[in-house]
Amino acid sequence: MSDFSHILNWKLLFGSHKFPGPDGGTCINEAAVVACGFPYQRVSSVKAMPACFSRPICRLAMQLNDNATDAQRQRLMPFVTRLACADTPEVEHERERYIDACLASDNLFSPALCLFDFQDGLSALEGALAIGRQADPLGTEEAAGRLDAARASAKLAKKRSGSFPVKVKGWLGLQQTPEDVG
């Protein structure tokens, strides 16, 4: 598990992203969506996550992702394949209470930013993941293949987007075409 981020060569970044960049370039929840076999989607709120993902766990993962330094953020990679573990409402509530208790907050996800030590947050994430249903095991190679496919799609989309506007402008006569010399 310690080689997970090296194997995937995926970079976790702050915030949510329209589409992954050539080096990954997504938050932990966006990477988890792709790694679990869903099409890439922007995740600006845990409400956007597929139903099989635990909301309290994804909230904590998002908060860890967005409050971490770049180096700390990469330590979240081993958790990418473990977030799809939604359970009954009772278990989800137990997870939320556990996270709040670990981080000594009455309302961890209030609009006011709740600051806590990154390592404490990682420990809370690990503990919350131990409660209830575990995510289906996903091999590193399978996750890597899915993330690589998303990265390839991003490169292809960028390559296509560069020429399309030029063609449209040419068709509409909005751009001059170079004259032939000769």
Image (spheres, rainbow, N blue to C red):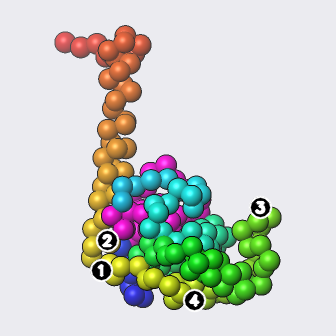
Residue wearing tag 4: 127
Residue wearing tag 3: 111
Q: Amino acid at mark 3?
A: Pro
Residue wearing tag 2: 144
Q: CA–CA distance between discs 3 and 1?
A: 36 Å
Q: Image quadrant of residue 111?
A: bottom right
Q: CA–CA distance between discs 3 and 4?
A: 24 Å
Q: Is residue 89 visible?
A: yes
**Which numbered dot is residue 139?**
1
Q: Amino acid at mark 1?
A: Gly
Work out whether residue 131 or residue 172 is closer to the camera in this orientation and state it: 131
- Upstream in the sequence, badge 3 or badge 1? 3
Instruction: Inspect the magenta stretch and tell me whether residue 174 lies in it.
Output: no
- Upstream in the sequence, badge 1 or badge 2? 1
Q: Classify mark 4: residues with Cα within 10 Å, few (<14), some (14-19) or many (20+).
A: some
Residue 7 in the image: state x and y as whole percent: 34, 78
Q: Image quadrant of residue 126?
A: bottom right
Q: Which of the image's four quarters has the C terminus?
A: top left
Q: Nearer the viewer, mark 2 or mark 3?
A: 3
Q: Residue at x 35, y 21 (%)?
A: 168
Q: Classify mark 1: residues with Cα within 10 Å, few (<14), some (14-19) or many (20+).
A: few
Circles 3, 1 touching at the beta carbon (< 8 Å): no
Q: Which residues are magenta?
A: 9-37
